[in-house]
Amino acid sequence: MASRHRTDVLIIGSGAAGLAAALHLAETTRVTVVSKDAVSGGATNWAQGGVAAVTNPDDSFEAHIADTVAAGSGLCNPEVVRFTVTRAPAAIEHVVSLGLEFDRQGEALHLTREGGHSHRRVLHVADATGAAIARTLSQRAVEHPNIDIMSGRVAIDIMTGRKLGELPNRVVGAYVYDNQTNAVEVFEARFVVLATGGASKVYVYTSNPDGATGDGIAMAWRAGCRVANMEFNQFHPTCLYHPEAARQPGKGTFLISEAVRGEGGQLLLADGSRFMERFDPRGELASRDIVARAIDHEMKRLGAQCVYLDISHKRSDFIETHFPTILSRCLGLGIDMRREPIPVVPAAHYTCGGVVVDLASRTDIPALYAVGETAYTGLHGANRLASNSLLECLVFAQAAARDIARRLRIEGHTPSTPPDWDESRVSDSDEQVVLAHNWTELRRFMWDYVGIVRTNKRLERAQRRIDLLRQEIHDYYARHRLSADLIELRNLVHVAELIVRSAAMRKESRGLHYTLDYPRGAANPTPSILYPAADPLDVIQPLAAPPRRARRNAANTAAS
């Protein structure tokens, strides 16, 4: 019999969004957090820049709103932008109350400036703000008596009343794979929060850790949620270019913070000449999409493997104080940024689209919420303003927690019980090479065909390859016992298709989506929303007896 767990609120993911939501909820209810890695092992831990918030009298909400909307290239939801920006001070106050100490200059907070911002408004902890936030939240979560943290687990799929053939439709729990026991566990829950991060691992070069495989987005899509703006994948312009830069387990290519450019860093070609002013009057302080395309253009024009980011004109003590993590990592690779430029390249960094949610983080399925990079709130539009991501995590985690707490008080609903996972008709695989090959192929053609610059022909090529891979992965999933790699690969191929379909819908270039076939923007931009099938074939379990209503479908059916 499968191991079973019961909780009021199940949170899948232990980054800033997931742990912030858990800490808000734990004041009134029991919460279970499941995590792939050790708590605080997600993408939050590697975020260097900081949290954008208006804390200086010289700044204003209106200026922060205007900068966010400008970066979003006409696709931000104005109501969501104002909601987020005006709640930023309260979100900051909450993490400070938990023990987080932002850098100060005397008595005042030290604020840095990043690309796209008109003011210094980014609160930070040196150049390791994400690690400081993750550490603070995880310490408080581990200490809290109402929070159970279960690590080393990968969510497979969420369960809903619809999948059980019951109405009304709502979340009833999730199936979760335990990496230690290689067994599938059943989690029964009245509410589920998806906080699994983004999907940048769909690309071969990424700044994200290994877990950024779009799990929450894929699970919500298979369950029947709308997904929006998946074509807008942010490529961070400046990731370290070095053979050893991405060889630490669990990490992507090491990111050189936006704040380096914000503090005067200059982008150079190999001959020492600057080039950004040819692309944007703001130069190095242009938004990330513009800087990434400019670097990509220069690399392709010159056949160069990288460009260079130089801040060596600043005092050594300034660099040592503001960028100790970056300096240490570069020194470990023989690069002294105090005296020489850093070789950099763009890499996939952030998923601006995701599961459609409202201002309370509610998805289309009752009792299912999505927060952080998993969600599409409407804040980022066609491009995310630097350091708005951690802000979004904190603001919408609080919004979700408040709504769930309210509903727990007024609702007496007891969810149905998901059936045990059935592996009686699957076998162990002796062809792990299939997974490795498919994983590599998927990420490579996504980089080549659906990367920084796209065309209709490239998207068509990508879709044809996705069609083949999806069927192979589906067949493999249906016949063999699960592994973490298989679960993630299944999610990645679904997310890849969502990205390609969204990109094909957008007959224009806007923000992070640039296509040579439609180089100009449209007059009336709208989000690209994908609607799931009316009755998606989603018999979660491989070759298991389908639950109730779904028995009419072929026994070998799984979402693909």
Image: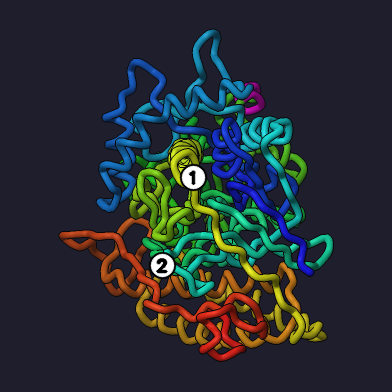
53 is higher (above) or lower (below) than 472: above
> Which one is in front, 454 or 295?
454
Q: Quadrant location of residue 283? A: top left
Amino acid at circle 2: Val
Q: Dot 1: what SS?
A: strand
Nearest to the observer: residue 75 or residue 301: 75
Q: Give the range drawn in magenta.
A: 317-321
Residue drawn at point x = 39 percent, y = 71 percent? 454
Tell me if mark 1 has few (under 14), some (14-19) or many (20+) residues whose alpha carbon lies within 10 angstroms of its own. Answer: many
**Crowding at mark 2 (Cα within 10 Å: few <14, some 14-19, many 20+):** some
Residue 296 shows which numbered tag?
none
Q: Which residue is drawn at 55% across and 9% down?
A: 106
Magenta: main secondary structure equals helix
Q: Which mark is residue 453?
A: 2
Numbered mark located on residue 267 in the image = 1
Q: Point out residue 514 in the picture as x, y percentages from the top left corner.
A: 35, 64
Residue 343 in sight: no
Residue drawn 42% across the image and 25% down it? 89
Q: Which residue is drawn at 52% across and 85% down?
A: 465
